Amino acid sequence: MGTYWLQADLKILTAFRFFAALWVVLFHLGSRIEFGGNYFKSMIENGARGVDFFFILSGFVIFHVYKQSILDGVFAPRRYLIKRINRIYPLHLMMTLTFIILIFLRSITGISHDLDLTVNDVLASTLLLHAWNVTDGLVLNGPSWTISAEFFAYVLFGLAMMGFQNRKIPTKTIIYTLILTFTVAHLCAINLGKTAFMHLTSDYGCFRIIPLFIIGILLRRYASWLNKEVSLAFGVIGILLFLYLSVLPDIDYMLIVPFSLMIISGANLSGQKWVPLNQKIFTYLGEISYSTYMVHGLIIIIYFDLLPKIIPSLPILFPNSVDVLIVLMGVFLGSVFSFHLIERPARIYLNNRFASD
């Protein structure tokens, strides 16, 4: 097949982040709105799997970014970890504070008489421990349990790469580690009464990310072996397989296959102008997707829980389709706001302050 070198800027993978985030947003909307019995509804019901796509993609991108510095022996674990923290923590902290304030406001205004907030929940969320089964379910900004899991994967990656400075990681080491972590995560899920580790969240969701993250690393190892034609074929097969599997009830591990094919294809076809996902609009939507993921829970709560208290007729004012459009527009505007005013400025400032060369 030859060697096809990946570009530094993987635009299609950035665009994929938007669609994965949108899938999760629609999944959470599905618990508030009846979409009807159709193909679209079946796909939405599996929207939690968008998180697993994120986890695989995260492993791919992290290894893509740091692979050469590891081989060159210049990988700096401290700087790497600071940059990872600067990437995820400022917005997470802001959203945690926002939810704390929201809960207090709901209590003092009588919208909700139960404070529904504990010191343990605040500490777990603030210290990024809320994917370690230390809370009674999802707390504060519910979807943010994934940030706890991501941070765990970042730490493990940094520690592991310290042992591979100036040398290539043996493929068999990656595969053995994948088998081990997959087995441990699966057994953990079974012990908790779940059918697969892809259903773990606050109850040891920290283990859910590790085998998926390693799959991403393994995909990056082989991605550059493929030429454009094979990559395109993988992409088409991956999308068709995804469209088939994503509507099956309670689908889990099987989705790893189309996710992997799509990621490899997207990586190799990034920069090809004839691929629509390389357009700036999709790249931008992907860039703000972390904000999308982090703010969507708040927008949904405001629209379905708080506004009806102020406007009692709201629940019957619009049909479901209009409700969906309003919420999605609110999520988009919230994403733009949080990305440009919080996420990006904080990351740039903190990187310049603490992680500059």
Image: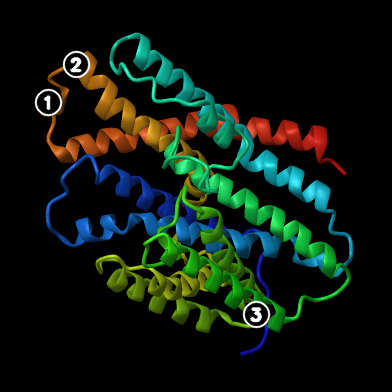
Which residue is nearer to you in this view: 228 or 199? 199
Q: Are marks 2 and 1 in contact (CB under 8 Å)?
A: yes
- In which quadrant of the rendered image does the C terminus lie? top right
Q: Can you identify the residue that label 2 sits on?
A: 311
Label 1: element kind: helix
Residue drawn at 48 percent across, 69 percent down: 187
The answer to whether residue 26 is above or below residue 97 is: below
The answer to whether residue 52 is above or below residue 35 is: below
Q: Can you identify the residue that label 3 sits on?
A: 176
Q: Nearer the viewer, mark 2 or mark 1?
A: 2
Q: Can you identify the residue that label 1 sits on?
A: 317
Find residue 137 and report its image quarter.
Answer: top left
Whether residue 271 appears in this view of the structure is: no
Number of numbered markers? 3
Which residue is nearer to you in this view: 343 or 133? 133
Amino acid residing under circle 3:
Tyr
Which residue is nearer to you in this view: 8 or 331? 331
Q: How is the image coloured?
A: rainbow
In the rendering, at what x and y percent does residue 107 appear?
36, 14
- In which quadrant of the rendered image does the N terminus lie? bottom right
Q: In this view, does 226 lie to the left or right of 357?
A: left
In the rendering, at what x and y percent does residue 24 appear?
37, 50
In the rendering, at what x and y percent does residue 170 appear?
75, 80
Q: How far apart are marks 2 and 1 (CA)?
A: 10 Å
Q: Which of marks 1 and 3 is in front?
A: 3
Label 3: element kind: helix
